[in-house]
Structure formats: structure tokens, C-alpha cells
Image (cartoon, rainbow, N blue to C red):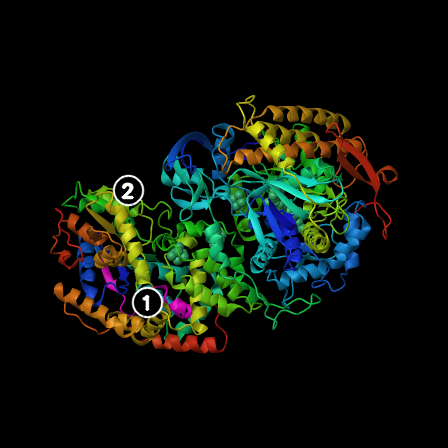
Amino acid sequence: MLTYDILIIGSGGAGLYAALESRSEEELRVGVLTKIYPTRSHTGAAQGGVNAALANLDSTDTWQDHWFDTVKGSDYLADQDAAEIMTREAPMVVREMEHWGCPFSRTDEGKIAQRPFGGASKPRACYSADKVGHVMLHTLYEQGIRHGVNFLNEWQVLSLMHDGTRCQGVTAINTQTGRVHTINAKAVILATGGHGRIYWTRTSNAFGNTGDGTAMAYRAGLPIKDMEFIQFHPTGLRRTGILMSEGARGEGAYLLNGLGERFMSRYAPDKMELGPRDLVSRSCETEVREGRGGPEGEVFLDMTHLGKERILEKLPQIRELCIEFEGVDPIEEPVPIKPTAHYSMGGIHTDINGQTEIEGIYAAGEAGCVSVHGANRLGGNSLLDILVFGKRAGKHALEYARGASFTPVSTEQEERDTQMINTMMDGKGSGITIADIRHAMGNLMAEKVGVYRNASDLESAISKLADLQEQFKQMRIQDKTKAFNTELVSALELKNMLDLAEVVTAGALERKESRGAHTREDHLERDDKNWLAHTMATQGADGRPKLEFSPVTITEFEPKARTY
Amino acid sequence: MSEKIRYGFYSGCCFQGADERFFQILQDVFAKVDVELELIVDAVCCGSGVIEERSELTSLAVNAKNMAHAEQMGLPLYTPCSTCYNVIANAQKRMQEDPAVHAQVNEILAEQGLEYKGTCKITHTLWVFAQDVGLDKLKERITNPLNGLRVASYYGCHTRNPADIQGYESADNPTSLEDILEVLGVQIVDYDTKDDCCGYHLAWPNNKLNMQMTSNVLEGAHTKDVDMLVTSCPLCFKSMDGTQAKALAQTGKNFQLPVLFLPELVGLACGMSAEDMMLRYHGVPVNIRL
Amino acid sequence: MNATITPDRKSILANIRIQRFTPGEHKSAFYDNFKVNVETGMTVLEVLRLIKNTQDSSLTFRAFCRSKICGSCSVRVNGKPLLACSTQLMPILDDFKQESVIIQPMRNMPVLRDLVVDIDPVIEKLAKMHPYIMENRGRIPETLEQESLMSRQELTKFDYITDCILCGSCYSACSAASADPNYAGPLTLGKAYRFSADVRDSFKGERMQAAVDQGLWSCAQCRKCINVCPKDTRPAISIQRLRKMSIDDGIHDTPGSRRAKAYTDDVAKYGQVNKPMLPVIVNGPKGWAAIEAADNYLIKHGIEPTHQVCTLDGQSSTQKIYAKVKELESRGENKT
Ligand SMILES: Cc1cc2nc3c(=O)[nH]c(=O)nc-3n(C[C@H](O)[C@H](O)[C@H](O)COP(=O)(O)OP(=O)(O)OC[C@H]3O[C@@H](n4cnc5c(N)ncnc54)[C@H](O)[C@@H]3O)c2cc1C
Ligand code: SF4
Ligand code: SF4
Ligand code: FES
């Protein structure tokens, strides 16, 4: 049996930072297990920036300003003690990244450059051209190589194991061989990222952002928190969901509906295309709902009137993106777009050290929920979250593992998981494919649990998701080869997504208010009296989510209306 | 006789000294298709990408000088050497992209009363034949079509990589060489190693690897049972003809594959003799019926 | 629908030939043909996924971010390594004027299954190159209370390489890597330059030696790596710069550094490389054997050998260029 003192699941920013923090003790065995190669994690996709009140651009900026912006941005659902820790520690972790060689862009004086970001009162997003997540991820990986971090690449975790109070470890399948293993670990840190893929192609997230760790924790009886909050970005490319930054609209691009009308005049006659993200997302969605979308339910971002020269000079990267991924040259024609699921605010419930209710089990990053983002994450705060809480989880796990002993574990779970896989691989099945179910799930979630929500849509989504779960049970994997079976990888991910989709929907149905990213057409107002609370979901004995609510920690800022 | 097409001839090192015969051959072959070369006498060695290993600025200045002379002559700069083409075209691109560097280079050239304006057009044998002369005219001048000859075509690397140093044709799927060969009447044979590098530029720093790479390319063509390999690059020619015996011996292979430099084959098809093309100087004898 | 919003789009029933292989199941690689309706706008990855979702779910390939940032999805299409997720297929069909393409796994790495290759050997080579910053305490403060300062100019020296996504395309394209399994390859040498050029680093010496040991002078400068790199990180250029750096740092005793010196000095002196004498210049006295062999070759072909450098009439003016460059460099004004 494989054993690790500390096993980190996931090699995004959160996992790698945790690994670097926890490996400082020579005699402890620390491993990073990840279903891809470390540098392929979705942290690399972040382009914009990471927030820290360094005050390099605006000398009046303080961490307290950042703290307030975060709480306000969260629509007061963030725990203020957690947000305080994050914003106070931000300058340290960003400087640590810099000391490790991260190539941040520079100011005239040679300091880390910062830019303004939505929802921030001062320019404090530290950036590296348009590749900040990429360079942070690579910097962490490089330091991992330097310090001899032990990687298990292309291993997929299946189940989380504990004895009711203490961590036992995980089961995982080695994709390259197809074998299931039990791994005994004193401490496990789940850093498996978000679950934007429950919207399938309607997301800016990577194929593998399927919420594996969150689903695994849920199935292991741990509470998962605030799952109904999913942030949408208004402009994802139609075919792939890939993000088109605000840059184009900033430069004067128009949003057109299928009839060629500049429809924002209906929703934000003053700001037009430059209205806030959520409003623009909702407006796009309304156009499509009311039958004014394009043939595939899209709207269009039109830059043609800007002219070739201006596009080439000001928006070369955006143009390249449109050509490469959509086959559309914005100089010649409008670009088809749809709102795209972008960030999962919810996740595994943890305290400020990343600890869950089970000793030795930790979660960090987008998979976890402390919560610092509440109902709506501010741009640049999630990269910060993964650093600060990845580090804290690593540090705490190290202290824990130093004192703790291994909790014995049998191979029972391994046998169950092997059996589950064998069943999926066995026989011909009903003819329904993973692709069919995934597609149906994505469309269902986008239509009924997307930008707009209401009770009847959500109820119908719950029942349709149950159908899909039934279909999943009938589904059989056609590829019978053990080694590198990517169809099996996808099936296991789909199982996780179906579980989480149900929790997201149940939470959305229960929460009868509109807050942050959660908009109920039938409850348009924020309702602090009844809903200033975290949603805690656990899996009931019947397999369905059970919801409870717990109070939000308020230390400094009394909830106010969120206006900008 | 129709109009002559004229170029400033940048000779590189393959067309002087012991290799001067190639200059002669080129001029004779080009005469057949109404092309005239005018030697750029003030040109200096492009440095074949090696001077950069000491000073990029020096390399840029040297090649700006080469282009400046062509600009003064009012002619496009033609070089038959793919590496010279690559290095000079790269210098041109670098200065186009970075006006500050361009200005600094001109500051250097000013000391000898030169200015590189950036207007110089650069071209290579491939495009002289395939585009400037044109396939139609080339076809007209062919008196000895090489029907039935099985030929492996080999561009080498430096007219193709990176893609943006030339605007003449697709870098991923260039066809100029095959277009020319087709007009000559030969049968073009596809082979696995045609996109590989012969390793010529490793001759000094890592000769063993050069031999291995040359041998790999040759073997790929040889297994397709071709009569010869034809290349548009004089350095690839040197590697694959001049050092073929050594390369194959070092890698334990035992065959001979005649290699021709593209202008030689064009000359033969235009009715010139093996003697005119001085084929006796080849390392690997060219004994096939032509 | 507004006419300007739905321009004409093409659709071709294309034949997609894909190399298949599962070790242990198949004796050797073979090809499967799939018919796919390729439309304008479709990437190579979309085509692969379409085949997997609708025709053969066992088709195996990697992809993750599908947005050109993770480096998972490199495959070869008609021989050229590229990112499946950011490459439109229609323009390739147009370029090759065919209704069919061949998709193969990358070269120079063992195939794990179908289009998936084992990149561990490359990552191991990278790891040996010390691909990380070791703190230069002259630049990096001891505490996290302060940042290290770095000018934009200092950053520009290596920033372009930090775009590398470790996709392996350059390694697949490199003929030197095919011919010499010990050669580190373009991406690893690019990284070696990236860290050595960073003023915050203190490990340049060791890294430079690692680079020399792993083939700094085995790059043929064919520049294919520049051509295929999806992030335009120009590995061959970094290799030139790394070579320069190693010479500047005093590693003079390699054939490569002697060649660099010979070319540079000769061009200054004669406007031309002294080719006949190169063997001795690069390899020392044992180079005379090569010169003799060359002489014999010439004699055999009826050419009179000469050890004189050949020059053209106007090739004397290069000294002025060299002098001026030296002057600029000594004043730290070199803009390259
Ligand atoms: C397009 C885009 C742009 C963004 N821009 C910004 C920005 O500008 N600023 C900002 O702050 N945030 C941004 N974000 C958000 C931010 O990038 C993410 O929230 C953050 O990177 C998440 O990091 P992570 O370490 O938690 O997870 P990830 O980086 O997603 O890593 C998850 C890891 O878990 C592993 N894993 C998952 N499941 C399993 C399993 N079953 N077994 C084994 N391993 C598993 C994966 O292999 C992966 O290594 C952006 C997000 C997107 C999608
Ligand atoms: S230039 Fe060098 S590293 Fe790049 S592909 Fe050619 S031989 Fe390989
Ligand atoms: S240098 Fe370019 S081609 Fe090579 S691995 Fe990096 S990104 Fe890929
Ligand atoms: S899938 Fe990530 S680069 Fe193509």
C-alpha cells in the first residue's frame, strides 16, 4: 500500500503552494497526486491579476481597503475574519511568489505592476502581461522541482476515506495503467479546483474542472458550502466558452442580438456595453430567452465598426483568440458569444486553516470554501485565495502530520471502486453515451440553473437531473482497454458533476433571495433577515442533498446595499 | 529574347574560393532563363548565425550592410544559400519589428556612409525559378526533360523556418521545389525524412551528430529507391554529398545516393551537359542516365 | 437574421486519418480513417472530440484547457506539431489543397496510446537543467516585507520565454533530438536561458555547465522549433543567447565557442570566414588531418588547394562596424 504523511490532491496553485509549505520537514513524506501534469492545471488560465494591497501604484491603498472591497463584493456573504486574513497576508504571498522568480510586470521604479480591476477601489491587481496564472503556476512548479516535490501525475482520485473522526487516505486510479490503488495518508489536502464544467460547454473552465474533490468530500459525508453561487462572465466564445476579456467592449465593441440591434440600450441606456458583468450577462440571456438571439442561442460582439487598424493595434490578442478558436475574424464579422460559467464560489466547507470537520482532511483553493468570496468573487481574489489558503492548509497539515499517527485503512473502498469501474466497463449498456448525458446536463444547467433562476425551472431541473443520474447508471464504457482509458476518466468525472449539479440546483431552489451571482426572478431582492447565511449541504441517507444553514461571521462591516 | 531579370548577387561562402565553380554554374543556368546576376562586391559574410553567439548587434549591422549595398544597386538581393537567406531575412525582420535597433544599426553604418532603408527585397533560387522566371518560361526552355527520373526533393530548413521570414509560399506545405522539379519532368518520390534537418551547422561543434543527422535524411530517401536527392540548399548539398561517405560509414550504412544541387538539375534539363555542370566534382558519383 | 451576422461558412466532408496504437494490444501502429464534416470554425481538437463522441470512444488523446495555455494537446497534423485546441482545421485543408489530413502523435517521445506520448523523459531532462531561481541575495531581500526590484529592461531579457507551456511541440520537431537521445532539446535549453538571464538568480554557473553537458552545442540552428512553437518563445534564439552567455562566462574550451570566436574574428579581419583553416582553429592541431583530407579531396577532383582565405574586393570595411559596436557595447548602449 502506498503511504504518505501528507498527500495533496491537485497541482494547481493551491496544491503546489501547499506542497511547498508542507515539504519543509525532511523526514515527512509529501506527495502531490494530480490527474494531469502539474503545469496543465487550470490556474494557468488566469490572465488578469492577483490582488494584494502593495500600494505600488496608489500609495494610499491598504489591506483594509482590500478587505472592505472583498466583503462588499461578496454581497456580505463572505466571512469577515477569513477575508481579513486573506487580504492582510496578500502582500506576503505575492512577494514570496516574486522572490521565487515569478515574472510580474514592472512599474517604472521596478516594482510589481498593478492594474485596476472590477470591484476594487484602488488599482491592486498584480499582473504579468496577460498570463499571471500561467507564470504563477510555473513558478510554483519550478520551485517544486528544486525542492524535490514528489509528483504522481495522471492519477485520478476516486474516493476519500476516514473513520468518522480521522483521515485515512484516498483511493485513486493510475490512468496510465488503469489500476486502482489505496493510499494511506495521515493528512489529505483537497485542492482539486472548481466545478464550472457542470455547465459543460457553457463555461470558461478546463475540461477537467469537474469538482472531483468536492464531490468526493460530499460522498464521504463532509458538508459542502454555498454551492448555488456560480459566477458567470458575459462574453464566452460560442463554440468553446473560452473567455473574451472586457478589453473589446472597453475599446468600443457593440453587443448585437440576432436582429442586429444594440440591445444594451434596453437595459443600461447610459453605460451600454460597459455595464457591470452580471447585468450584461443577464441582458444577453434575456435577449436569447425572448427569441432575439442568433440561431444557436448566441448574441454577437461586433467590432467591425472599429476598423482594421484599430483592432490590429489595440486588440491583437482578442483577434487571435477569435480566429484560432472560433474561426471568426472580428475585423470582418461579429463574434458569436454566450454568457459562460466562470467561477465556483462554493466548495468544501473549511475553517481558516483549510481544515474540515474530519481531522487531517483539508481543502484549499477553488475546491474549498472558507468563505472569502461569499456570493460573488472579485476578479483577482481567487488567485490570492489559492495562495493564502493553500499555504495555510499546507502549514497546518504539516503540524498535524508531525504529531499524528497513521489511521489504518483496509482495501474495502478500493474493492468497491474497482467493482464500480468493472460494472461501468461491463457489457454494451443502453446505447446512451457519456457525451449525450454531459451535453444534456450542460444545457439543462445553463437554461434552468444559469444566469436567471426561478422556482419552477429549478424544480424541473431537479427532476431532470434525477433522470440523467438514472441514465448514467445504464451507461456503459465502450473502450475496454485498461491503459489510458480516457473514456473512463470522463465517466468518473461525469459522476462527480451529476452529484454536484444536484447540490447546486437544490441550493438555488432553497435560497429564496437574489444575492451576488445568484439571481432569482421570483425573489429579486437580497434578504438579509432570512438569508444572510451559508448553505451547508451534506449527502442524506437517500443519496439526496440535505441542506442546513449556518451564520456568516461579521466582525467589522455591517451589511449595506451593494452599489457601485 | 525577352527582358532580363536582374538581381544583386550575394554570394555567401559557397560560391567563392574552392567552390567558385558553383557561381559559374549558376550564371550559366540562369542565362538559359534570362536571369542576370550582378555581384554585390562589398558584401561580407552573413556570419551564418554564428556571430550572434558573440554579438547580435554585430550580426545585424553586418547584414544591414549587405542589404544596404543591394538597395544602392536598386536590385533585389538574391542569395542561392539558404542559410544566408535565413540570416539576412531574420535581420530584416528583426529591424522591422524594432525601430530602435534599426536606428542603432544605421548609426553604426553611418560611419561608412551607408544607410539600410529597409526596402531591400530578398529572394532565393526557389522563388527566382518558381515565381520570377515562372514555371511557364522554365518549361519553354527545357530541351531535355528528365522523364522517369525518381527524385527525392529536399528543401532543408533555412528557407522554411521560421515561417514568417518569407512571404513567398506556405512554410508548412511549400511546393516551389516540387513545382520546379515537376516542370523538369522528374517523378517526385515522398519519403519520411524529408522535413528533417541534415545537421550541417553542427559540422564544427558536434560533427558526430552532423553525420548521424545527414545519414538519417539520406537513409529515408534511399529506402524509397530514388535515383537521386535534389536540394535547393548548397550547405545541405555539402553535407549530403561531400560528407555522405563519412556519414554513412560512421552510422554503419552501406549505399550511395547521388545528390544534386537544384541549379545543376535545372541546367541538365535545359540541355547542358554533365561536363557543363561539372558533376565530376561531386563526392558521390552521378552515374545515372540523364 | 441580419445578413452581416451570418457570413458564408464552408463545410467539407473530410477524411481524417489518425494513427492508432495501444502497446500490448497492437504489434505496430496503424491508421484509422474517419469521415467528418469539417466546418469553418472547427479546431483540430473539436474534430478529435467529435470523433470520440460520435464514432469511436476509444480514440485517445490529451486535452485540458482547450485554450492554448496548458500544453496538453500537441499532436502532429500533416507532420507539423501543433496545439490541437488552437488550430483551425479548414485552413490546413486549404493549405494542402486536400480533403484529408493525417494526425499523428508527437515524435521523439514514446507513444503511450494513440495520440498520447510519454513526456516524462523530456521533463527529466528539464529537471536536470536546474529550471528554477536560486535566490541571488544581492537582489532578493531576506524577508517578505520587501519586493526585489527589477527593471523592465531586465525583465524583457527573458520574459518571452516564460510564455512556454511545456507542450513539447518544439521537441517533437527537433531533428537533433531525434538523432541524439541525450540532447536536452529546445524547450529545456530555452528554460536554462530564462533562469540564467534573470538578475534575481545566483545559479548561472552550475546551470551553464548543465547546459553544456546536455548539448548546448548540439543544436543545429535549423529553427524548426521557432516555427512550431505555439507561444512564439523562439527556443533557437534563446540557445544562441545561452551560447553567448556561456562564452561570456568563460567557457571557451568547447569546439562551439572556438567556432564562434573564429567566425567573429575572421569576419572582422577578412569580411569572410577563413574556411580552409577552420579545422585547426576549432579542433587544434589535430585539425590538420582534416585539412589534409580536404586537400586530397580537392586534388583528386583537379582543384589546386589553397589555405588562403578567399575574399571579395569590398570586404575590408567590417572593422569599422566592429569598432562601433564595441564602443556602443562598452557604453552599455546596445539595444538588441
Ligand atoms: C479563464 C479564467 C480566468 C481566470 N482569471 C483569474 C484572474 O485573473 N484572477 C484570479 O484571481 N482568478 C482568476 N481565475 C480563477 C482562478 O484561476 C482559479 O480559481 C484558481 O486558479 C483555482 O486554483 P486551484 O489551485 O484551486 O485549482 P486548479 O488550478 O483548477 O487545479 C486543480 C487541480 O486538481 C487536480 N485534480 C482535480 N480533480 C482531480 C482528481 N480527481 N484526482 C487528482 N487530481 C485532481 C487537477 O489535476 C489540477 O491539478 C480565472 C479562471 C478562469 C477559468
Ligand atoms: S534549432 Fe536547434 S533546438 Fe531548434 S529544432 Fe533545430 S536543432 Fe532543435
Ligand atoms: S518552447 Fe514552445 S513549443 Fe517548446 S514546449 Fe515551450 S511552448 Fe511548446
Ligand atoms: S488543451 Fe490546453 S493547450 Fe490545448
Q: In this view of the protein, which residue sits in the foreground, A181 or A200?
A: A181
Q: Residue at x 59, y 30 (%)?
A: A419
Outermost residue toward the top in this view: A430
Direction from residue A544 to residue B249 in the image, left or right: left
User: Which disc is residue B190 wearing?
Assistant: 2
Horizontal and vertical percent for residue B257? 20, 50
Q: What's the CA distance linking mark 2 and mark 1?
A: 40 Å
Q: In this view of the protein, which residue sits in the foreground, A206 or B106?
A: A206
Q: Which residues are magenta?
A: B36-60
- Tell me if residue C260 is in the magenta stretch: no
Question: Is residue A245 visible in this depiction of the protein?
Answer: no
* Residue type of the residue flagged with mark 1: His
- Tell me if residue B45 is in the magenta stretch: yes
Q: Residue at x 74, y 65 (%)?
A: A59
Q: In this view of the protein, which residue sits in the foreground, B269 or A375?
A: A375
> Circle 2 marks a residue in which chain?
B
* Residue type of the residue flagged with mark 2: Asp
Horizontal and vertical percent for residue A356? 75, 45
Above/below status of C100 relative to A9:
above
Above/below status of B68 relative to A555:
below
Horizontal and vertical percent for residue A551? 85, 43
- Picture quarter containing residue A294? top right
Direction from residue A379 to residue A477 in the image, left or right: left
Secondary structure under tag 1 reads: helix
Q: Which residue is mark 1?
A: B69
Q: Nearer the viewer, mark 2 or mark 1?
A: 2
Horizontal and vertical percent for residue C292? 19, 70
Label 1 CB-ligand 2 distance < 8 A: no
